[in-house]
Amino acid sequence: MTLPADLEVIASLVPAGSRVLDLGCGDGSLLAHLQASKGCSGYGVEIADGNLRQCVARGVNALQLNLEDGLALFDDKSFDVVLQLDTLQHLRNTERMLRETARVGRIGIVAFPNFAHGPNRLRVALGRMPVTKTLPYQWYDTPNIRVGTLADFEVLARRCGLRVTDRFGLHEGRVVRRWPNLLASVAVFRFEAG
Amino acid sequence: MASVGLVTPQFMSFSEPLPLKSGAVLPAYTLAYETYGTLNAERSNAVLVCHALNASHHVAGTHADGSVGWWDNLVGPGKPLDTNRFFVIGVNNPGSCFGSTGPMHTNPATGRPWGADFPVVTVEDWVDAQARLVSALGIETLAAVVGGSLGGMQALAWSLRHPARVRHVVAVATAPNLSAQNIAFNEVARRAIVTDPEFHGGHFYAHGVVPQRGLRVARMIGHITYLSDDAMEAKFGRELKAGPGAALGYSTQAVEFQIESYLRHQGDKFSNYFDANTYLLITRALDYFDPAAEHGGHLSKAFAAACGRRFLLVSFTTDWRFSPARSREIVKALVDNRIDASYAEIDAPHGHDAFLLDDARYHGVMRAFFDGIDRVGGSTP
């Protein structure tokens, strides 16, 4: 099974055999890949009916829960890795979710669109909101309730008492480690509870 | 989609007494059951369907009298629980009134109908009786056990009492035990029956009467709790029986509103076919179900026994009798034990009754789960 290049990079961050909780797991393709190729196990959390059905169809454990209600269902440190990919920008209570992620998992991995990516900056400098591959929505019609930057997340992570163990950018499937806040369309952070 | 067609109930008698949770025993007994589809050579494609309060072994297909199975929209050729691939078993529980040994049958000790003396049966006792039927059909391990509401409790109990004999568990619109409010509704229903002058302490058969008034009220209160407030409002609102704009009768006794007419109709229908002692027994089985109780109230400890099974849980957002919060308690117990499980919370408007309806999201996830069983379990005939 082939994953989009960005997901391949994320999958490579997950140690083999991990217990994984994927918050906002979509159609379950990443979890299915981790199960099949890295011997991982665990659960996805997903709110959309169609995605949930697809998870079940591909043999991925999926729980239909609203992440806004928190992670009370999951015990402290009950997962090796908690993933939050393309999820953060849809949630109202980002700060609580990050603290909960660090509580439930030994390692947290977060990926989200980096608003400080060069083309976005240019677009804003020209007076318009960006519409790109990573941020494909018009400002008036978007499921994203917030946008943030790689640099912004550093500040929030400190505020939440998280210890960032790795951070880099992704752009069109390539890892960007040099000036990621300018050159990458996606921000990726790996962190642990401080 | 096709139906399994014409079906005929079968009966199997068991001479070995069934020890019950209460300490009593059910001496000899007979179970009514139906099967659909074909058992494969490996005997690995059997799925047991457990029934809820007022249903029976007649799960799918049509009887000669035209009655259609209670889960016919789910079970059949090409349906989510596909009888082209699975061998599906429906069984009537002891204590019921649809063919299996129940209170209206003869108590061998007295030569008279059991009546109120029929031993109190629990969800666990039913599951033990079902396990004997499954064995007698030559099946060691079920591909899955499936149920909704009280049937869901039986599916859960299978995973706790006979975990080695079931690979998958599907529990819909169910709960790990009844809340005080739920027991309260059951108690109102039971009091309605027991205080009916024609109940005669449960031995009404000898008097040639039926406590129909009690049964009607029991059914009416039950029915209210199976529907959501919104569904009832949408279906009936304040509509008058006499039609829109009709003059009010200013009567305290006559049927004025459509909802009254509907409830009375449901009550009348029910009181003509359901047994009063069965109603008492089945509501009691609901009240007593509480697998966490034997583990100091820790549901997660109870579900340690179910490790290795795969679960699908489904709840409905407007079901206030078996609410999503109760299903999430079960999900938590499964997650705590690292048991493979999926959970669907379907945003359906119909209340508890939704588990009997064919909502596409609900049946879609059921189909996906059963298809997965077929894939990993080698259950193709």
Image (tube, rainbow, N blue to C red):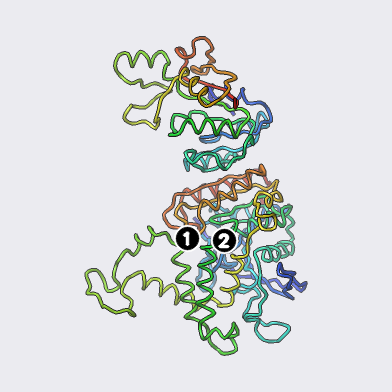
Which quarter of the picture shows residue B291?
bottom right
| Residue at which label 2 appears | B178
Residue kind at label 1, given as amino acid type:
Asp
The answer to whether one can see residue A162 in this image is: yes
| Residue in the picture at 43% in, 15% down | A117
- Residue A155 lies, with reference to residue B285, above or below; the image says above
Along the line of sight, which residue is nearer the eye, A74 or B39? Answer: A74
Which quarter of the picture shows residue B180?
bottom right
Along the line of sight, which residue is nearer the eye, B238 or A48? Answer: B238
The chain containing the residue under callout 1 comes to B
Q: Secondary structure at mark 2?
A: loop
The chain containing the residue under callout 2 comes to B
| Residue at which label 1 appears | B353
- Residue B194 spot, x, y in % from top left: 54, 79
- Residue B256 lies, with reference to residue A162, above or below; the image says below
Q: Earlier in the sequence, mark 1 or mark 2?
A: 2
Q: Are marks 1 and 2 on the same chain?
A: yes
Q: Secondary structure at mark 1?
A: helix
- Residue B152 spot, x, y in % from top left: 59, 58
Residue kind at label 2, given as amino acid type:
Leu
